[in-house]
Image (cartoon, rainbow, N blue to C red):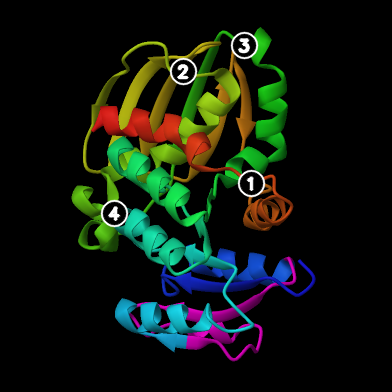
């Protein structure tokens, strides 16, 4: 690509959008437009770019269609909207001629994942999935030692205030619940490192917590996930604890670099964690 890659973002007012905006800047990209029903998007001014803004998805759809008929089309539409809307917004982008970079989970169900694969084939566009923890040095180290690990435990506590239950994240229909909101990140890492699930998991899940066990190809994994208590992001491998709290600041940038070099993760990579989360729900 001789020119700077171009981007537009859906969900510019959300928690994760600033990481994507930073990553776009880090890889030398240009952010052309953003869309969000909320107008608290001052983050768009961070790099002084004249970013077009649309509060309605229909307005964005019109703009994207027109832009992709010009000499400066949108190479990637970045999807950071509520979980249950991800696949719909991926389809919108691909049908307008752009590739997609989508936050986790790319879909809530395998049925919608299959449908998205069909749109990829129809449009000849591609969805790249943000699975940023795979780029964490500690995860890479963990993956290299899987042959010697028998048991692994995950404790991932991401405390959220009362707002959480009132937001779309607290609505299982829109988010998939804590199993998906928090768990999809960790289940992806577990299966990336230790192989696919080989048996039905045993678990208990509530609005703010999920605990359970699952047998993987190369280890037995136990998880404890919650949106309460002190923050904790650890994997314990046969008694040795690995903390993922450090080194996460620029993982989205690493994800973007991999995508632009043709080494990103696609729908097939995202499938195992989506299947597991769907089964748990």
Q: Earlier in the sequence, mark 3 or mark 4?
A: 4
Q: CA distance from mark 2 to mark 3?
A: 10 Å
In the figure, residue 80 lies in which quadrant?
A: bottom left
Quickly name the residue at label 4: 84
Q: Earlier in the sequence, mark 1 or mark 2?
A: 2
Q: Nearer the viewer, mark 1 or mark 2?
A: 1
Residue 44 drawn in magenta: yes
Identify the residue shown where x is 69% and y is 44%: 263
Q: Which residues are magenta?
A: 27-52
The crowd level at tag 1 (other Cα within 10 Å; few <14, some 14-19, many 20+) is many
Q: Is residue 99 left or right of residue 65?
A: right
Relative to 268, residue 11 above or below: below
Quickly name the residue at label 1: 264
Quickly name the residue at label 2: 221
Q: Nearer the viewer, residue 117 or 101?
A: 117
Q: CA distance from mark 4 to mark 1?
A: 22 Å
Question: Quadrant where the N terminus lies?
Answer: bottom right
């Amino acid at each position: 690509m001789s020119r700077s890659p171009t981007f537009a973002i859906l969900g510019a007012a959300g928690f994760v959008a600033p990481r994507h905006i930073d990553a776009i800047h880090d890889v030398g990209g240009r952010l052309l437009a953003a869309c969000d029903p909320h107008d608290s998007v001052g983050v768009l001014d961070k790099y002084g770019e004249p970013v077009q803004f649309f509060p309605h998805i229909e307005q964005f759809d019109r703009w994207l269609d027109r832009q992709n008929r010009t000499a400066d089309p949108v190479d990637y539409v970045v999807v950071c909207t509520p979980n249950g809307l991800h696949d719909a917004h991926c389809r919108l982008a691909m049908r307008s001629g752009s590739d997609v970079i989508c936050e986790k989970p790319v879909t809530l169900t395998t049925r919608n994942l299959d449908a998205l694969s069909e749109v990829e084939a129809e449009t000849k566009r591609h969805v790249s999935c943000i699975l940023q923890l795979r780029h964490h040095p500690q995860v890479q180290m963990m993956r290299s030692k899987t042959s010697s690990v028998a048991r692994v435990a995950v404790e991932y506590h991401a405390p959220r205030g009362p707002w959480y239950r009132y937001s779309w994240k607290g609505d299982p229909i829109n988010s998939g619940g804590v199993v998906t909101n928090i768990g999809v990140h960790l289940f992806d890492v577990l299966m990336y490192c230790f192989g696919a699930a080989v048996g039905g998991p045993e678990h208990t899940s509530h609005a703010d917590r999920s605990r359970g066990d699952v047998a993987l190809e190369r280890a037995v994994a136990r998880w404890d996930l919650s949106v309460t208590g002190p923050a904790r992001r650890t994997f314990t491998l046969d008694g040795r604890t690995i903390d993922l709290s450090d080194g996460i600041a620029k993982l989205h940038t690493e994800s973007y670099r991999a995508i632009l070099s043709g080494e990103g993760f696609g729908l097939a990579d995202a499938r195992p964690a989506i299947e597991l989360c769907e089964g748990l729900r």
